[in-house]
Amino acid sequence: MELFDNLALGLGVALTPANLGFALVGALIGTLIGVLPGIGPIATIAMLLPLTFHLEPVSGLIMLAGIFYGAQYGGSTTAILVNLPGETSSVVTCIDGHQMARQGKAGSALAIAALGSFFAGTVSTFIIAAFAPPLARVGQSFGAPEYFSLMVLGLIAAVVLAHGSVLKAIAMIILGLLLGLVGTDGQTAAQRFTFDITELSDGIDFAVLAIGLFGVGEVIANLTRGEESRSVMSEKITRLWPTREDFRLAWPAVLRGTALGSILGVLPGGGATLSSFAAYVLEKKVAREPSRFGRGAVEGVAGPESANNAGAQTSFIPMLTLGIPGNAVMALMIGAMTIHGIQPGPQVMSERPQLFWGMVASMWIGNLMLLVINLPLIGIWVQLLKVPYRFLYLSILLFCAIGVYTIGNSPFAVLVAAFFGIVGYIFMRLECEAPPMILGFVLGPLMEDNLRRAMRISGGDPTIFIHRPISLGLLIAAAILLVMVALPAIRRGREEAFQES
Amino acid sequence: LLHILARKNVLAGLMFIAIAALGLWVSRDYPIGTALRMGTGYVPRLLCWVLMGLGAAVLIQGLREKDAPPERITLRQLIPIVVVTASLIAFSLAIEQLGFVLSVLLLIGIGAVAARDIKLWEVAVAALVLIVLGWGIFILGLGLTIPVWPVW
């Protein structure tokens, strides 16, 4: 079968000693930053992006992907043991996971979270392998108008699924689109928004922007907030295996979480965080006694933790097959591909099958490694939680500075990153979310290019977007989404889903 | 009045409007062209007008909010902003002349001011560990051409 041939090809790439090593490094770093609150996968991937210059493209992508799904494993450890979310995607795990830990069932909660994540990771790897090729074939039939409409849909969906104010999220996307225009106009070679600074004529480098906003910005935000006291559960974790009763309750929740996460991950704007919130709400709805939730219900750990890992992995599908990033991490992955001169899009799969299938196969291997990293070695990660933030932020700051400098051996880039660090902090204070802006920044130049090409195809007639059936369908979907957010009932439901904690 | 102006959404709205206005001013001479042959300024100016409209909407929303607390910025919050920025500026100025070791020392030395209860020996240990680690990863491991010591 084609599917297994492809996976075999991928395993051949992923099982080379070097790529196994990079998958392990990615999984370890992912777990580390997942466990540590105050640094997330977006900042970490942005900081390590410059490093992947010096690696084979497939090795670099394997490592970066490992960080993203590794963080989903690590995040649950902190949530269960300290009652602090190590990642935003494990916010809901705190609710019941920490209660389980207080009842002496920490080992059981950790094992359920890890096993559920592993199951979800395995299933979603096969989902990627099965659904990516047909989707890429659809993508190859797309012309400029279809791509433009698809990107409009992607951006609008990102807004609808983001938390917080819709109005501000749209404004942030526009801001991202504008920032993407800085530099030399590809069509007319004119300078735009460069303020006569020569270093800006090539535009703002994507990695510099991301490191500034997420790396430096988060350091500033954490320092202004002051260190929160962490009380790590001091009792020994005695029993690292769930009871039969826990298993019985957990496995249907794992199945539901995996299904929900796999679907929500594919949607633009979806991914790990949305999936875990939605899974928690779902578990509460289907439970026979909803009152157990908040008091250590095992389903409240199993569902969201499976969902966030499934969502993290299936969010690779639109990125790998269409070249459209659904969330900020995928925007970074696109950045990593373009660094190596790979144009993301449906042609990646046919032109570079080794890269594509190697990455997919490495996801399953990475998940297997993570199971080992997280269960028997849990004690080491707990120790790491005792490292105070004052050491952590100095290392983050240094990695940001060196990372930015090495992109183009440019001291100026460090200044740009410092500027966006302040900007990122202001955004956080004003509750303007930066991830939609990053999406706009990545999609901006692509959209302008496709808009101009579509206009040339149609001879300046904007109705081309509604005369082409696929394009029309995508735009209608976008319009429906916008109307949905405007409806009060749905808006309330959306707020509820995000305010679960 | 100041209390109203310092609300989150009011400030956000004003920020968007200010950025849009700046964008329109900078792009005032960019040729707009036509929809068929879009000039350099077509898309940027369009986006700026949309951003201005959205900013105004956020601003109005902010003004109509009841009892939204004003934002305050205290000295304790200002210190990390200034210190972190200063440490990065120092690193950027130093890296090509003073080399890797001294630049990292500068970055850590200045950056450590932002931590409230860090001890001097802790800064020294952190600097030493990070210099060795950074040198090992970036210069030895990846072979980046960063001067290690000052260039005279």
Image (cartoon, rainbow, N blue to C red):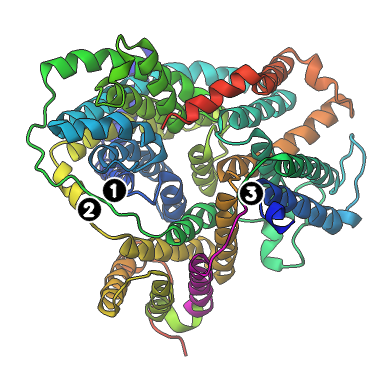
Of discs 2 and 3, which sits in the foreground?
A: 3
Q: Is residue A419 left or right of residue A478?
A: left
Quarter of the view holding residue B124: bottom left
Of discs 1 and 3, which sits in the foreground?
A: 3
Q: Are marks 1 and 3 in contact (CB under 8 Å)?
A: no
Q: Secondary structure at mark 1?
A: helix
Residue type, mark 1 in image: Leu
* Residue, far front: B67
Bounds of the magenta segment: B70-95
Q: Nearer the viewer, residue A303 or A235?
A: A235
Q: Is A20 drawn above or below residue A494 in the view shown?
A: below
Q: Are marks 2 and 3 in contact (CB under 8 Å)?
A: no
Q: Chain of mark 3?
A: B
Circle 1: is it few (<14), some (14-19), or many (20+) Cα within 10 Å? many
Q: Which residue is mark 1?
A: A32
Of discs 2 and 1, which sits in the foreground?
A: 2
The residue positioned 84% from the left and 53% from the top of the image is: B24
Residue type, mark 3 in image: Lys
Q: Which residue is mark 2?
A: A384
Q: Which residue is mark 3?
A: B8
Residue A284 position within the rendered picture, expressed as x and y whole percent measured from the top left: 36, 17
The residue positioned 35% from the left and 26% from the top of the image is: A304
